[in-house]
Structures are given as structure tokens and as C-alpha cells.
Image (cartoon, coloured by chain):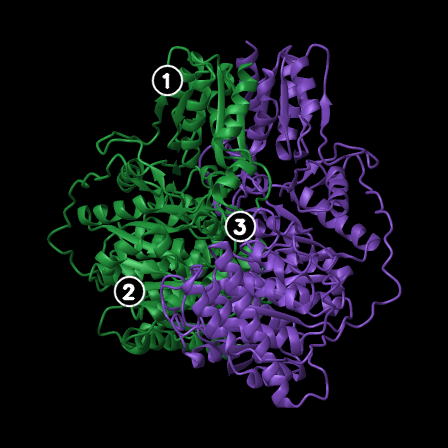
Chain colours: A purple, B green
């Protein structure tokens, strides 16, 4: 905020000066780096200067302050502009900008939360508004007055995820959320689909129920006015549709194609750009004075330990249902737990949490990308979000999950209805690649409980773990294996059957644990003893137990999983023990499955007790 | 089409009768199966009866006829209704409907192209309109007069991919495309976000440039009128917004929640439903007479062999660029080749194809899901679509890729800019999980060329292969390894360095091949001979060569890859040779990378020549 008492003219002149500073810093840093997107910074410089120095309330020395206004740079390739704004606001020394994009600096090519002023990683377009939605919902939950601003590029208006967020923000009546679209007309390889058709933008956003304000994005007065109107608008979010020019302020690139993602060459080219931009600097600018956030509430929420489960040995409970039951106990224990679903809450059993804690439950309807983006936003403000849907539909949000991993986000995902054991609905509803997908991301914990007790405790461990956790659950009801006070750990496993005569170790998880136990009994009748391991933690994996079991059973392991053969349980075991002379054989689903009864399908695709028996007999013959 | 000469009243009465038939068949088949979504069938029965028996032109005995009108059931859970319509049209015996959802019948829980009248698998919502866009573009390409109809559920209007298709269809002015939204108000777990607010639907679709026609979806006359208006509308697509009731025609479930995905119980419940529906049947209905498609053109397009590449031994060419060059030669050889991109065509080098064959190039702007969906639609009409973007952004479309695998679609995907070797842009732009993601899907060929010549031939092999193929390419320029007439095969590999004294085999692919070659030379100086394999085909994998190399080199393999450790090159090699007593050590990226110079990053993340040398020395010590 500029010092009160300034005339309107001085205020605008100072902001224009600051915008010129941001442009110059963006050009300098990208030229020094030899790469980057200076023209994409120039189009948005007036917007960012207005927001950072005349609209937003925050403490630049404490970017994590819970009541700071939030700013998300959805068009992450304009990172140099973001960095320049924070430097100019006082968060760090502007000289550091010249280390942009080097291995030694956290000022990366696209923003990541390695920087304390970045809430969520951006750079994959069409994700910022979804995260912003989470930030805005969090303000409501925390009864904080902070506002959330999200700066989008025009190109990313094409990403459907943006419209998922638009529909949801209207539904939630988030008047504390303000999007800005930097309509600079030019994409990477071509003009954007709508170019400068500002009316087309206006009708789309208005149709989705937003307060849509087209403005000249280089007119500081118009921008100030738009942000004031946004702040006054009640019951709906606002979008400022800013008509801009890519490369604004540098005559030889302004509104010109073929300048996307190109730094100015050191020397004449960069000098010329900076000289032109410098003509907009004031000889002596007024000092800026950024208003701080509201003070913090006195008492943080208290957390209790989760209550234990209360299953009886004879119960038969689907792991998805046990997950839903555990969420309630978690919700009682910890007020930071929030839950999201995407119109399948009566299948994932998150409906029970929704009923008990309606304020902390967010229905996303059928929009999985938006669900994950919202969760990432909530997690960046210290909530512990559990987002649940069918495992197969998490593939819809894989880019969001990938970016959440880059953000080191503290989200918890639950994928239900995994594998052929769902039965009649057919392959489109079967999660068969979720382990491959989730385990590929560094730092993600992957859990796969087989019974209700284990599900309970793994859900609790997921909440306590700092970082992303994936919990894989099944559709069919399965028996109880464990006592209610059994101990589980991330990275653990359970040896369910063992004897001194074991000739092979079967490693199973989820529904195949019960097939392995059936096979164990059948093989026992035939005089063949096997060891059975419940590998409930896939990442990290219990290498010590696997190795010990293998050593005791002729260095022979058979894995069996309701997942495709690549990247699942078998490959994880293989990668863990291969170099210790252990042979690992796999039973997994190796083709696109068909509809049918669950038991029929387990057998048809080679992962039933019968197939385990056959394979063990062959391997031990 | 009903026989001409029928009065309007008779026509409507007959269609109402047919809609009742479809409802009854849907109830019967789901009750027999014991599961399914009869109420979702009932809401759409009037729409489907009108389309199948009074609007569409097609040959029910030849569903694949190139000039048939196309129908895509985007709301795939209404499969029983689709099956009933085709049975009633004469495609197969209606008695077969009673085998719905069994292992013995291809009438699966959700439609798949195992059935000859299904173009694309559906069941993951929000994908049908994208495929329909591809079908409509294909009609234009083939100069065929067929029209494409896509029936969506209202719940899937929330999926952003639907709006990607909406924006693109407007852009392409596809007046041969007609969407129908079955606005039945009820999702799975809750009312939909817009419920019966038909005006909200109208303004959204109108804002996206569509001819939007709200109608009573149970009024046959209104539906007939809407479809006629759609056929007359020029220059824009039409959406028929049909207000309907879930469970329409069965009083005790009509418009009631908690009936999603529930079959009526055999006996009283089903009997009562069928009795109510039967009151709408005519005692004697007029015979239906479906008009056939236009006849086929006389001469099919001719295909020539692709021209060889013309690289010089001293050239330095990025594999992404070689891909772009190969596409031009493919385009010249085969008129069925079409290319799609998502605003990065100057990075993937598909811009060259776009320039040469503008009619066969489709710019998707920044909408990867829609790009893949459109490609699947085009492939279902015998085109060979190559869809290209950064590998990391293919994660955005993973659910579409998953469904394409279920469709056994003949699409070819190219993911560029893989790994840390892209450098400064940082982790959000690095494809590091694409191998895990693509190889998990059964039936997908995964190729990873290291030089331009190999890229050329693999691109040609991809076009010839029937089924999905993924080609992984890199950003940096790399040397030429192979002669222009070198032979490559899907499932092959190349031994680049070998001697009788080799002590270990290094298996590399893409950019790491050059690191391995550098390491080879460095180790040779140190007196350590190693074998080097270019594993350009990841799936299928050349097990025989890998095994032979391992046997000749102390059963020791070191893999090195610019990909995360899980599910990539190393795990693929491991899975191939583990049980033959081969030890496989992996060098791969094991954490979220940082921005930096490409060479710095290869070294920082442990996959440079230096790390290979170190590891080989350790393993052979």
C-alpha cells in the first residue's frame, strides 16, 4: 500500500514506476540466466505491481503469516516477475535475482515452495486457480479475513481444470477469491484461441457466475478500481480480465509472436530493452508502505490421539469402509483434518465424515483435478486434507499429483475400488495402475491395507506423516485379520504365516492377502509349507523382513497383486531384494480385464488362490 | 427413421413405445445382472429412442460403416440403454441383453470397443465429447456427411475436459457435432451442482459459442424439433439440454435420490417397475425403418513406404526434432497420418507437419485431455493420430490414456522434454514418470530413441503398429549414432560397445546412452571394459539380448536413466531378467530435481558419465 496522503496521481505514478522496476528486474535476471520468459513478465507487471504495492495486505518478512493475503502465480513461467515483486517488497535482496535458474539458487525456472513465499508449485498451467480455491476455502474455515489473488495466463483458460475451479468457486460463493487473467493474446506457438476477444472472456466467466471485470491491464487506475470493486463484491468471486500486451514496454517485442520463452541477449539487445523500460522510472519515487496482516488468534487448535478401532474378529468390512470410519475418529481427534470427495462419497464412505463435520467436508462433484488442486491449497495453510475417489479416477488428476509432489504437499489421497475385484462394472472403474503412478513420485508414501484394523491405523499414520500419502483400498468386504491394538508402521509389513519348513514366501497386499491365506491352507494339505507376508506398506518397503523371509524360504518369493504387472507390488519387491540373490516371481493382471463376478475375475486374471497354489507347486517342484 | 407417410402423432406414439421398450430392456438386463444403473437409463430413454429410430442414419448390421452417423454414450453407466437400442435396431438378438455384465458376454458394465458398435470406451465421465470432437473432425477430413451425437450426463458437465471440447468444437465450427446433456438432476451421491437450473446450463454453453437448445427431454416432439434445428444450424455445434427425471417412468424411483447404480430386485420390485413401464407400450407399433448411410467413395487412399532419413554422421539433432522431421515423411507416405499438439508445436517440432499438411494438423491449444480424446476419436475412424506435447503434460491426460488403452486405440503419443536434461526450466517441465505411467497400461508399446536415425525409424514403426505407442524424446541436441539405413524393431535393442573382456553391461536409453559411451571410454582408459546397450524399446523389451549381454559380463547389469527410479528403464530390465540370476543395479533420479544447467543436473542427480564410472568401478572391484 502506498502511504496515505499521496494524491491519486502520485500513487499511480509510483505504481507505474514500480511496474517498470519489476520489468527491468525480470529482463535482467532472465538475460543473466540466458533463458526464461521476460515478455510474459512484462504483460503482467502492472497487475503484479498494483497487487503487491497497493492492494494486498501482508508481511514481506514473514510470507507464511496465516493472515497474509495470498498470491498464486498460476502462469508460473512469469516466475522472474514474482521473484522481483517479493524482492522489491523487501523479502530478500534484489541482487539475488541475478542467480535465477541456477543450481545454487531457489529462484527456479518456475516457482516451487522451496521458496517460503510460494504456497504451491506452478508451471503446469491450469492449476493455480484450483489451489487458490483451497486457499480461499481455508480462510473461511479459519475465519481469517485474508484474500486470495490468482494470476492466470490467457492460454491456460483453455485447460478444463480452470473451469472446474470456476464452477466450484461460484458454488462456494467465494467472494474472498479474486482471479486475474493476463490476456496478452499470445501463447507459446500461436495466438491463443480467443486472442483479444475480451467480450468472449467476459461472457464465459459471467456465465459461470463470476463478477467479471474487463480492464486495460496496463492502466493502473483501472486495475485499482477493479480490485476495489472485487473487494466490495459479496457472494461471488471476481475475475479481473486484463487486456495486456506481451512484452509491454519494450517496443521491439511488444505484441509480437516468436518471443515466447526467450531471454534478451546480453549486450545491445538487453540494454535496449532496459533503456526503454527505464524511461518509465521516476527520478525519486515515494516510499512504499505495505500494510500488514491481521494479528493471529490467541489459541491454536488442540490435537488428541485418535481413538482405536472397535472391530470384532468375525466382522467383514471393506477397507474403503474402514477408511471412512477412521476419518471420523481422526476428525474428532484433530481439527486440522479436512476431507474432499468427488461425487462418490457413498462409495468411499467419506459421507460419514461429511455428515459429522459438514464444515470440514468439501464436495467437489465430478472434478478430480479440482479436488486435488483444492486439497493442495488447503494443505499449504496447515490443513491435513484427505481427498478420496475411485483409484482409477485419480489418474484424471495425475498432473496435479505430480505438481503436489513437487510442492511437497501434505495431502493424503485415498483411491478405492482397486483392481479386478470390483467385478461387474468393468475395466473403466478398476484402479490397476495407481501403484505405478503414485510410487513413481519421489517422497510419496504408498500404503495398501488388507483389513479394517490395518486401514484404521494406516489412515491415522497418514495424518501424522508430513508429506503426501496414498492409501489404496478395495471394494469387497474382507475378514478382520488383526487385533484392534495391533501396531503398524509406515515401511512395515506383517508375516501372517510362518514355519521352519516354509519353502517359499508369498507376498500379497489387499485382497490378495486372503487369496494367499487360502492358498497357504490348500498347500498345507498337500504338504507344502509357505510363508505369507501382508505387505501393507509399498513405499517405503520393508526390505529387512522381505529379505529375512526370502533367506528362510530358499530365496524364493512369489508376489500376487490386484494391479497391472508394471510398477506394482511385484516390481517394488523386485527392486528391493533383487541384488541379494532372491528370485521374485509375479502374479499380476497382464491384460485389460472384462466385466464379471469378482471371484471369477480374480481367477480369470491369474491372481486367485488356485493360481497361487499352482505357481507355488511349480516353483517348489 | 419411421416410415414416411406416418402422421406426426403416430410417429411420436411409436417413438414413445420404443422408449418404453428400451426402458424395459434396461430394467430387465440390470435386474438379471444384479447390478447396473437402470435409473440413469430411464432418464435418457426418450433421447436415445428419438436418435436411434428417427434421427440417425446408419446401418445397424454394419456399425463400422464409415458413413454411419456416430453415437457416443459419454455417460457410459447407461450402457444397458445403449445395448437395448442397438438390439432393438437389429444389431443383435435382444435375448443377449440378459447376459449383461457377465464374463461370457461383451455387454460389459460400461461400453468398450469389444462391441463393434462402440467406437470408444466410456465409463470415466467427461471423455465422450472429446472423442466426439475427433469423430466430427474426421467427417470433415473425409468429406463424409455423417453426423456425430454425444450423450452426456449432467454430472460430467463438471469435468473440465467437457469445456475443453466445448471451446475446441466452437473454434473448429463443427456444425456436424451435436451434444445432448441428460439433465436428470441427480449425481451418484448428491444432487448435481446445477440441479435442474436449465438456464444456468444454457448460458454456459451459449457463452462457449454453442447453439444451446433447452428442451423437455421426455417430450419426443420437442426432441425431434431440437435435432432438426441442430441439423439446420451452420457454423457452430449444437447442444440439446434435455431436462429429464432420473428413473423416469417408474413412479417409486422417479427423481428420487439413493437410486443411483441400483438394479431392481428380482421379483416384486422389478415386476412393478416393468408393469408401470409396460403401460406405455402400444398394442401394435409401426415397423421402424432406419435410413442407411451414404455409399462409400470408390477409391481408398494409397500408402507408400516412408522415405529414409538423411542425417550426416557429424550432425547433432535432438530426438524431438527428428520426430518432427519423421512426421513429414510419414505424412507424405500415408494420408491417414494426422497430428495433434497442445501449443508446444515449436518445441515438439510438429509445426513442420502443420505447415506442410495444415488440413491434417489439429492445434489443441493448452488442453491435453482434449487432445488425447480427439485423437482417440480420430483413431476410431481409421486415422493414425500422433499427439505430441511435453512428456510431463501427458500426465494431465492419464485418465484419457487409460481409457484409450481400454479402447485398444491406435493412437501414437510423443512426450518430449524428458528428464533433468531439460535443465533450467525446473521440475514442473521435466517428464520423469512417463515410462512408469505408459508402461503400466497393457498393450502399450513404449519406445525411447537416443539419436535422430533411431527416432526416424521408431516413428515409422509406431505408425505401422496396430495399437497405442508412446515415443519418449529429449530436449538437448545429441550426436548421430546410427547409419541412415540401420534396422530397428519394436522390441529390439542395440549393443553399441562390446568386447570379450567386458565385465559389466550398462543399459541406457535416450540421453544416458551418451553418458554411458563417455563412461565406456573413460573406463577403457582405466583398463575396465564394459558393454553398452541402447535399450530403445522399453515395452516390449529385448530380453534375449539383455540376457546374452549379462551372461557375457558376469551376470551384472547397470541401468542408467533420466527418469524416476520407480517403473522406468531399470525396473523394466529388472522384471525381464531377474529370475535368471542377473543382478541389476540402477542409476536413476530419486528426488524432486532443481533448476540448473542440463549437464550439472545429470551429474547432480547421479546419472552422468562420472557416476556410471564410479558405480562400475565399485561393482567390478
Q: Nearer the viewer, residue A337 or A502?
A: A337
> The N terminus of chain B is located in which quarter?
bottom left
Residue A415 seen in this snapshot? yes
Query: Along the polypeptide, which appears first: circle 3 or circle 2?
Result: 2
- Specify the quadrant of the image occupied by residue A179: bottom right
Q: How many numbered marks, from 0 up?
A: 3
Counting other residues with Cα less than 10 Å from the Cα at mark 2, is it few (<14), some (14-19), or many (20 or more)?
Answer: many
**Position of A481 relative to A472 (above/below):** above
Q: Secondary structure at mark 2?
A: loop
Estimate the spatial distance between the alpha carbons at disc 3 and disc 2, rounded to whole Å.
Answer: 45 Å
Disc 1: host chain: B
Front label number (3 vs 2): 3
Left or right of A258? Residue A263 is right
User: What's the mark number on residue B498?
Assistant: 1
Left or right of B249? Residue B193 is right
The residue labelled by disc 2 is: B147
Counting other residues with Cα less than 10 Å from the Cα at mark 1, is it few (<14), some (14-19), or many (20 or more)?
Answer: some
Residue B159 seen in this snapshot? no
Query: Along the polypeptide, which appears first: circle 2 or circle 1?
Result: 2
Front label number (2 vs 1): 1
**Pointers 1 and 3 within a single chain:** yes
Residue appearing at x 57%, y 44% in the figure: B593
Q: Secondary structure at mark 3?
A: loop
Query: Along the polypeptide, which appears first: circle 1 or circle 3?
Result: 3
The residue labelled by disc 3 is: B426
Amino acid at each position: 500500500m502506498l502511504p496515505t496522503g499521496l494524491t491519486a496521481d502520485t500513487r499511480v505514478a509510483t505504481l507505474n514506476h514500480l511496474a517498470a522496476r519489476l520489468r527491468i528486474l525480470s529482463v535482467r535476471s532472465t538475460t543473466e540466466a540466458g533463458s526464461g520468459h521476460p515478455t510474459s513478465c512484462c504483460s503482467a507487471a502492472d497487475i503484479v505491481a498494483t497487487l503487491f504495492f497497493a492492494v494486498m495486505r501482508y508481511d514481506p518478512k514473514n510470507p507464511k503469516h496465516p493472515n497474509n493475503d495470498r498470491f498464486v502465480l498460476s502462469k508460473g513461467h512469469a516466475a522472474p516477475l514474482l521473484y522481483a515483486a517479493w524482492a522489491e517488497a523487501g523479502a530478500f535482496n534484489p541482487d539475488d535475482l541475478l542467480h535465477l535458474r541456477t543450481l545454487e539458487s531457489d529462484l527456479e525456472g518456475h516457482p516451487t515452495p522451496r521458496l517460503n513465499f510460494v504456497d504451491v508449485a506452478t508451471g503446469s498451467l491450469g492449476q493455480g486457480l484450483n489451489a487458490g480455491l483451497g486457499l480461499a476455502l481455508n480462510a473461511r474455515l479459519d475465519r481469517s479475513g485474508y484474500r486470495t489473488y490468482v494470476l492466470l495466463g490467457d492460454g491456460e483458460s483453455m485447460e478444463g481444470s480452470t473451469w472446474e475451479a470456476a464452477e466450484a468457486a461460484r458454488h462456494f460463493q467465494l467472494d474472498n477469491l479474486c482471479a486475474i487473467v493476463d490476456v496478452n493474446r499470445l501463447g507459446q506457438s500461436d495466438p491463443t484461441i480467443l486472442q483479444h476477444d475480451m467480450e468472449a472472456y467476459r461472457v464465459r466467466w459471467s456465465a459461470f457466475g463470476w463478477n467479471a471485470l474487463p480492464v486495460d491491464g496496463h492502466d493502473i487506475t483501472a486495475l485499482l478500481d477493479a480490485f476495489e470493486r472485487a473487494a466490495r463484491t459479496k457472494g461471488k468471486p471476481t475475475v479481473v480480465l486484463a487486456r495486456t500486451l506481451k512484452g509491454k514496454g519494450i517496443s521491439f517485442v511488444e505484441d509480437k509472436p516468436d518471443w515466447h520463452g526467450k531471454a534478451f541477449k546480453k549486450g545491445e539487445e538487453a540494454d535496449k530493452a532496459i533503456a526503454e523500460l527505464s524511461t518509465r522510472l521516476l527520478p525519486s519515487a515515494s516510499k512504499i508502505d505495505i500494510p500488514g496482516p491481521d494479528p493471529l488468534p490467541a489459541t491454536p487448535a488442540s490435537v488428541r490421539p485418535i481413538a482405536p478401532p472397535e472391530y470384532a474378529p468375525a466382522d467383514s468390512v471393506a477397507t474403503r469402509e474402514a477408511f471412512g470410519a477412521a476419518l471420523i475418529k481422526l476428525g474428532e481427534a484433530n481439527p486440522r483434518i479436512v476431507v474432499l470427495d468427488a461425487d462418490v462419497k457413498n462409495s468411499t464412505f467419506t459421507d460419514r465424515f461429511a455428515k459429522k463435520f459438514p464444515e470440514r467436508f468439501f464436495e467437489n462433484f465430478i472434478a478430480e483435478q479440482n479436488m486435488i488442486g483444492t486439497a493442495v491449497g488447503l494443505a499449504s495453510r496447515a490443513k491435513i486434507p484427505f481427498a478420496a475417489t475411485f483409484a482409477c479416477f485419480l489418474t484424471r488428476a495425475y498432473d496435479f499429483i505430480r505438481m503436489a509432489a513437487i510442492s511437497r504437499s501434505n495431502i493424503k489421497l485415498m483411491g478405492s475400488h482397486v483392481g479386478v475385484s470390483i467385478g461387474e462394472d468393468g475395466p473403466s472403474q478398476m484402479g490397476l495402475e495407481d501403484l505405478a503412478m503414485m510410487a513413481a513420485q519421489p517422497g510419496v508414501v504408498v500404503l495398501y491395507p488388507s483389513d479394517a484394523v490395518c486401514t484404521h491405523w494406516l489412515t491415522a499414520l497418514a495424518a501424522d506423516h508430513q508429506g503426501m500419502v496414498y492409501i489404496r483400498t478395495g471394494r469387497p468386504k474382507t475378514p478382520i485379520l488383526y487385533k484392534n491394538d495391533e501396531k503398524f508402521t509406515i515401511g512395515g509389513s506383517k508375516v501372517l504365516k510362518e514355519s521352519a519348513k516354509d519353502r517359499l514366501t508369498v507376498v500379497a497386499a489387499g485382497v490378495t492377502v486372503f487369496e494367499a491365506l487360502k492358498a497357504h491352507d490348500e498347500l498345507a494339505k498337500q504338504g507344502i509349507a509357505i510363508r505369507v507376508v501382508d505387505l501393507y506398506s509399498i513405499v517405503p518397503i520393508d526390505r529387512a523382513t522381505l529379505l529375512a523371509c526370502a533367506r528362510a524360504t530358499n530365496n524364493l518369493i512369489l508376489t500376487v497383486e490386484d494391479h497391472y504387472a508394471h510398477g506394482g507390488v511385484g516390481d517394488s519387491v523386485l527392486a528391493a531384494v533383487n541384488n541379494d540373490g532372491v528370485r521374485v516371481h509375479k502374479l499380476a493382471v497382464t491384460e485389460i480385464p472384462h466385466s464379471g463376478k469378482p471371484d471369477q475375475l480374480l481367477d480369470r486374471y491369474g491372481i486367485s488362490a488356485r493360481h497361487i497354489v499352482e505357481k507355488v507347486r511349480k516353483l517348489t517342484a
